[in-house]
Amino acid sequence: MNEGTPNRQSWLSAALCAALGMTGCAAPRSTVSVPEPLKTAAGQVLSLSAHGIGAQIYECQGGTGDPAVFAWTLKAPEAQLRYEAGKELGKHYAGPTWEANDGSKVVGEVVARAPGPDPSAIPWLLLRAKQTSGSGVFSDVQFIQRLHTAGGKAPSTGCGAQYSGTEVRVGYSADYYFYKAAP
C-alpha cells in the first residue's frame, strides 16, 4: 500500500459530488503515488478505506498575533463516510473524529501534510490515532491517510472585522485510508 493507492471512488460518490455541484471529485482516479511523508510506519496494513463527502467549516477570526488581522480558520470537517461500494459507513467531524455506524471511533492528530496534485484542494494528510473507542471497524486504527482531495479550501477573501464569527461551509471530498498493526 505504500507505493500507491487504488481507485476507491464508486459511482455513488460521483453522483453525490454532482448533486453537491462539486468539480474534480467525480473524475475517476488511477493509482496515485503517496508522497513519502504521508506513508505509514512499517508494520501497518490497510484495514479499511472510505470516501468522505461533505464540508470543511471555516470561521472568520481575528489573528492571535494581531487581532486586527482577520482570516478564515478551520473550525471542523463535516462529512458522510461511505465504503467503496457506496454503503454508508459513518461520519467525520471535529476532533478530527471518524465515527462508524457500529459505534467505534478514532480521533486523529496530523503528523504530516503534503499538497495534493490539485492546487485548489485541501492538502493530503497523514494522521496518527491518538484515541480510539468502541468495538468495531475503527477500534484498532493506528494511522489515517487523507488522499485524493477535491475542494475544501478556505475562501481567500471576505473575512474582516465586520464578519468576525461568521461561518462558511466549503464543499469537499476525500478518500480516507485506515491502517492497523499487521497481525
Image: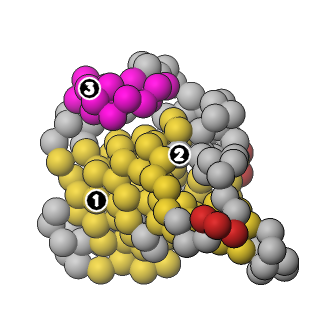
Q: What residue type is labelled 1?
A: Lys
The answer to whether residue 73 is seen in the rendering is no
Q: Which residue is drawn at 34% across and 53% down?
A: 79
Return the mark for residue 152: 2
Q: Which amino acid does label 3 sit on?
A: Ala
* Element type where label 3 sits in the image: helix
In primary-sequence order, the first of circles 2 and 3 is: 3
Q: Do the residues labelled 2 and 1 touch (CB within 8 Å)?
A: no
Q: Give the range drawn in magenta.
A: 10-26
In primary-sequence order, the first of circles 2 and 1 is: 1
Disc 2 from disc 3: Cα separation: 18 Å
| Label 2 crowd bin: few (<14), some (14–19), many (20+), radius 10 Å | many
Residue of label 3: 15
The answer to whether residue 156 is seen in the rendering is yes
Residue of label 1: 91
Residue 62 image offset from top left, x and y in percent:
71, 74
